[in-house]
Image: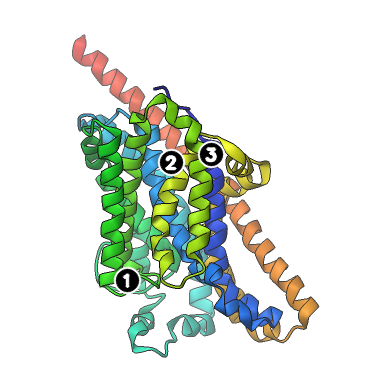
């Protein structure tokens, strides 16, 4: 059956996921500023890091939606074009953020000392934070590909490193997915991928925390593969499936919300994320309408820039003004909380308009030149 060229609510849900991740990074400082220690016990705020798993499922689904049919066979020109587009999607903004940090690292030893401080031997790798080898590793976005911890610069960029690994694997995974001929088989493979991930998380005692680095690449792979197979199931679904879209979406949100009342169950949110993406793809119901609203769509559009910069802004403000912020009264704390959120949004918007969008335009121009060169070469060969 024909599918929609654009699914706006999947942009909106990406913005909601980015906001949830922001909350999990900010709620510790916010609890101190607001003098509300009970916030530290919130399962909703603690589990915001699981928004990253939603990103990975979304990525696999959307890439299949955009590139459906291009990887029935692996052909170098198609693979090359895919990698060019993906390069300009992630590397320029990551490089810009890294370079912007360099003056702070060079001229603010107190900030460097804070980033290298640790009290738990399990976090001894922090002693290498903001090192030159760590800069190179983060610049190349390979920090999730190896067990070597050479030093973090922007901790959230581990997800980009894992995503790049997913991009490298995507042509092969997409070709394999295109060989799945039934919706049931595609759904079974999607579920199997997520079941495997949850089992690994439990077995490795990561069911209730946020494993990053090399283990983050494992999270990416199984969520990413699930997203790819989820799209295949969506593609193969019978015409009448669309009428269940709103119900699937409501059920997915209800499932995710229910898990947040029990400390161990949020690890199963990946199943809710998959169901949510699948339901939203049919663009039905009130939740879809909310995610397509102007403000949520705007947050979705800037979500990559907002996600990549917010953790640094929170860390820098905490280092520079932490004691003062924690000493504010209730009203002052509320105003400061809103102000910090606004600053994170402002930085995200600025990076979106000044770096992310121009990078994408540059990528399209590079693609046009590559295609023109291919056309010229083809004409010369046939002449």
Q: Is residue 117 toward the left or the right of residue 69 in the image?
A: right
Which-is-in-front pick, marks 3 and 2? 3
**Looking at the image, is mark 3 or mark 2 earlier in the sequence?**
3
Q: Is residue 9 toward the left or the right of residue 329 in the image?
A: left
What is the image's colouring?
Answer: rainbow
Tag 3 and tag 1, C-beta contact below 8 Å: no
Badge 2 density bin: few <14, some 14–19, many ≥20, Cα 10 Å: many
Q: Quadrant of the N terminus?
A: top left
Q: Quadrant of the C terminus?
A: top left
> Residue 194 location in percent, x, y?
31, 54
Tell me the CA gap for discs 3 and 2: 10 Å
The residue that appears at 21% across and 38% down in the rendered structure is: 176
The residue that appears at 22% across and 35% down in the rendered structure is: 175
Per the image, label 2 sits on a secondary structure element best described as helix
> Residue 97 location in percent, x, y?
49, 60
Tell me the CA gap for discs 3 and 1: 49 Å
Which-is-in-front pick, marks 2 and 1? 2
Which-is-in-front pick, marks 3 and 1? 3
> Residue 365 location in percent, x, y?
44, 32
The residue that appears at 53% across and 85% down in the rendered structure is: 110
Instruction: Check residue 361 in the rendering and tell me which mark sits there, or answer none.
Output: none
**Looking at the image, is mark 2 or mark 1 earlier in the sequence?**
1
**Looking at the image, is mark 3 or mark 1 earlier in the sequence?**
1
Residue closest to the eye, 160 or 320? 160
User: What residue does disc 2 label?
Assistant: 278
Badge 3 density bin: few <14, some 14–19, many ≥20, Cα 10 Å: many
User: What residue does disc 3 label?
Assistant: 246
User: What residue does disc 1 label?
Assistant: 133
């Amino acid at each position: 059956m024909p599918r929609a060229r654009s699914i706006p609510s999947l942009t909106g849900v990406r913005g909601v996921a980015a906001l949830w991740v922001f909350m999990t990074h900010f709620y510790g400082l916010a609890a101190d500023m607001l003098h509300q220690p009970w916030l530290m016990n919130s399962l909703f705020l603690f589990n915001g890091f699981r928004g990253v798993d939603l990103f990975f499922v979304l990525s696999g689904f959307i890439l299949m939606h955009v590139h459906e049919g291009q990887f029935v066979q692996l052909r170098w020109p198609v693979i090359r074009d895919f990698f060019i587009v993906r390069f300009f999607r992630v590397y320029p903004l990551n490089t810009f953020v890294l370079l912007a940090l360099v003056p702070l690292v060079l001229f603010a030893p107190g900030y460097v000392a804070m980033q290298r401080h640790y009290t738990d031997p399990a976090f001894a790798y922090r002693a290498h934070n903001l090192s030159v080898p760590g800069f190179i590793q983060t610049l190349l976005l390979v920090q999730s590909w190896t067990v070597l911890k050479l030093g973090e610069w922007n901790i959230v960029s581990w997800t980009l490193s894992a995503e790049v690994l997913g991009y490298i694997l995507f042509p092969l995974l997409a070709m394999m997915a295109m060989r799945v001929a039934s919706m049931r088989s595609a759904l079974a493979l999607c579920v199997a991928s997520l079941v495997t991930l949850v089992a690994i998380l439990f077995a490795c005692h990561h069911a209730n925390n946020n494993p990053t680095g090399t283990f983050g690449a494992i999270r990416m792979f199984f969520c990413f593969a699930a997203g790819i197979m989820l799209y295949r199931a969506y593609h193969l679904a019978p015409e009448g499936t669309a009428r269940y879209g709103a119900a699937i979406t409501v059920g997915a949100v209800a499932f995710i919300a229910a898990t947040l009342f029990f400390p161990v169950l949020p690890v199963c949110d990946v199943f809710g994320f998959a169901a949510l993406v699948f339901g939203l793809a049919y663009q039905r119901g009130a939740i879809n309408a909310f995610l397509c609203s102007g403000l949520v769509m705007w947050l979705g559009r800037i979500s990559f820039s907002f996600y990549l910069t917010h953790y640094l802004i929170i860390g820098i403000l905490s280092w520079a003004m932490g004691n003062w912020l924690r000493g504010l009264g209730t009203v002052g704390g509320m105003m400061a909380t809103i102000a910090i959120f606004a600053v994170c949004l402002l930085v995200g918007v600025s990076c979106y308009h000044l770096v992310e969008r121009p990078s994408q335009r540059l990528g399209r121009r590079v693609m046009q030149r590559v295609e023109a060169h291919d056309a010229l070469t083809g004409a010369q060969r046939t002449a």
